[in-house]
Image (cartoon, rainbow, N blue to C red):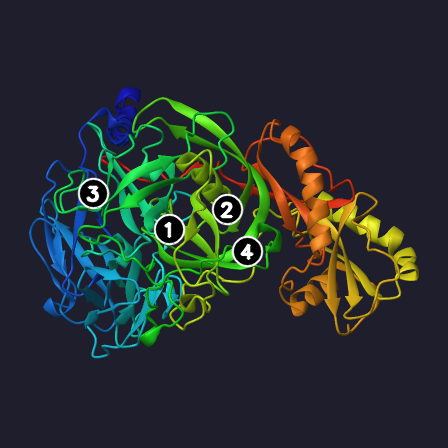
Amino acid sequence: MTSKIDSFQPKRMRYRILFGFLMAALLAGIDACGGGSSSAPPVSVTVTAGASSVPVNGQVVFSATVVNSSNQSVTWAVKGGSANGTIDASGLYSAPAQVPSPAQVTVTATPQADASVSGQASITITIAVTVSPASAIVQTLNTTSFTATVQGSTNQSVNWEVNGIQGGSISLGTISVGGVYQAPESVPANASSGQTMTVTVEAVPQANASVSASATVTITSPNQLAQNLPIELGTSGGNINDVDTTECAGGTLGSLVAVGSTQYILSNNHVLADEDAGTIGDAIIQPSLIDTINPCFSAGANTVAHLSEFINLEEANPPADAAIAEVVTSPASVDSTGGIIELGDSAPDDVPTNEAPASTILPVTSLVPNSTAVAKSGRSTGLTCSTIEATDVSVQIQYTHGLGGASFNVTYTDQIAVNGGTFSAAGDSGSLIVSQAGAQPIALLYGGSDTETVGAPVQTALTALDNLLNPSAPPNLTFVGSATRNAVAGCTSSGTDAFNATAPAQTPTAAPSAAEFSKATAAANQNASQLMSEHPALLAVGVAPSLDRPTRAAVVLFLRKGQPLVRPIPHNVAGVPTRVIAVDSIAKSGLLDQQTTESFVKSAGPPPAANPTAQQLAAAKTVNDKYAPSLMKQPGILGVGVTSSLDNPSEAAIMIFVEEGKPHNPIPLELDGIRVRVKSTSKFRTFGWGHPKPHSYR
């Protein structure tokens, strides 16, 4: 018979087999968790391109990173073959000579560690353009030609730009469709640095506007050049000793004055007398040391005059920054007619002639801020045109006693400010500012800021110099020139410099806040009905930015043009400044919403030329004289003078120049019944700042 033990043997066998399967499965699981050997992780590769696009015939580097392998070697390839470019073993891709279709090509990298995988990246092939020459030096109003070559396209046409403006502009120079660049009348200047600047000529292919090529143009004026004797004025010049171990300096020999038959060059102390460091008899040379063939050395320069007198800047209350130098007559060194470069009354082929100014001085009392048009011809920017911004200006200027000497400040009063930081630049100090209408002398330029040029009234300068020449009997210095003159042609010819020659700058430096608009809107809403009942000429009331106070919103009063006023327009409504716009008619009357007001303001165009009366300007001068001394002592205030209002061009105003970005005390909307205008600017300086050594422009 069969025993029990024997009957269980088949079951034991089944258990052993099952146990074996379980152990195998367990061991396999342990191995999968890293407890034993397994197959290597898969190899992969990532590819990156050094750029998203490359021009035809251009090159760019691709890189590959192999993952899960110590072998980083790859095999490079370009999909589509050589028509799409080539790539070498290092990953340097070379684009084809023509843009393929499609323009986007793919580059692949195959790891040598595993040829079954690959990575890829795409790059777009673009056309290429080159401009020749890559740089040029062009004198004002002269021309030079540029050519553009487009690679990778049959379309060779390009659009030419100057500083991003297609066709260029009057202030930067223009360029024709054929690539002929004509320099502007004046050398462009960077207002913030006070230095002249280069411009960029750019060619943009019509086949692909996303690519371009450019050339740099340096514009020079004839005023900078060394001249044969006798020289014209408005030219580069200065004291032969205006040099030290680290730098040299120069400015402008501005104009010609005379006592009897003795002629003198008129310029600044800081140009002719080295900021009080000069000595009577010093040689005055043309060009200045900064413009000689070997800068800071006088070789090649001509001695054209000798320092005669200068107003000492370090004495109390100097009236002007001025000096004179007696002209060398043997050989004849200066044009005895007093000719100033490009200040003439004619402009053949748009190139102004050289001519002396009028001999009669335009009185300061006849100047109308934001209306009187002026011009100057100076060493750095050449001929420029603008408008008087303010008169009777108090301003503080910093000097040094000679190059590198101790610094000191001078506060001038009754000065002239000219609108625009680009009216002059470093090196234009000493230039004569004249009226555009008749070339009558007005002021002697000596400094400025990023928004203004400042000068001393020429009559003030000549009177002070007269007293130095002969204290007991002033010899009466006068300008050399005819009694009357025609207009300065360069300010109206088709080649004129582009800085708007008659209208004041209107670009606000800051915009009113929402709170300002809210305050002005509330004032307009509460007072519109009363204003319209009191002023029959008032057609509509709205809210827009003030031009006199750029950070403020104003209540805008639209008046019917030509209709007389029953009573004066208020300068403010509930503490909000008013802005007056004269219109022939208006599409909607009454209280306007902000959007409608903005539309009407835009359609009305820029404010008309300022036209305050002589009586208003005289009243403003009285107020200015009263408050300027105390205002000049306040923090953040750089200058105070008499101007016209931009919010109401028929009124005079007090101009207060505040330092940009610096805090200042609250400034009232009016002083003794005269509107107060505020303008933000940089510190006023003589034009000797911001230029790297060894050259320094006066």
Q: Which mark is residue 42?
A: 3
Question: How many neighbours does mark 4 have within 10 angstroms: few (below 14), some (14-19), or many (20 or more)?
Answer: some
Question: How many neighbours does mark 3 have within 10 angstroms: few (below 14), some (14-19), or many (20 or more)?
Answer: few
Farthest residue to the front: give it.
473
Query: Spatial distance from mark 3 to mark 4, Cα to Cα?
Result: 69 Å
Question: Quarter of the image holding residue 536?
Answer: bottom right
Query: Spatial distance from mark 2 to mark 4, Cα to Cα?
Result: 28 Å
Q: Residue at x 45, y 46 (%)?
A: 476
What is the x, y in percent for residue 227? 20, 55
Looking at marks 2 and 4 on the same chain, the residue that comes earlier in the sequence is marked by 2
Q: Which of the two marks, 1 or 2, is nearer to us in this view? A: 1
Q: Are marks 1 and 2 in contact (CB under 8 Å)?
A: no
Looking at marks 1 and 2 on the same chain, the residue that comes earlier in the sequence is marked by 1
Q: Nearer the viewer, residue 573 or 281?
A: 281
Query: The disc labelled 2 sits on which kind of residue?
Result: Gln
Query: Spatial distance from mark 1 to mark 2, Cα to Cα?
Result: 18 Å
Q: Nearer the viewer, residue 22 or 308?
A: 308
Q: Which of the two marks, 1 or 3, is nearer to us in this view? A: 1
Q: Residue at x 20, y 42 (%)?
A: 42
Q: Nearer the viewer, residue 396 or 95?
A: 396
Q: With 560 as the anchor, is 369 left or right in this view?
A: left
Residue identified by numbered label 1: 260
Q: Are marks 3 and 4 in contact (CB under 8 Å)?
A: no
Q: With 319 as the anchor, is 347 left or right in this view?
A: left
Which element type, helix, strand or loop, lies under badge 1? loop
Residue identified by numbered label 2: 459
Looking at marks 2 and 3 on the same chain, the residue that comes earlier in the sequence is marked by 3
Query: Spatial distance from mark 1 to mark 3, Cα to Cα?
Result: 101 Å
Q: Which mark is residue 505?
A: 4
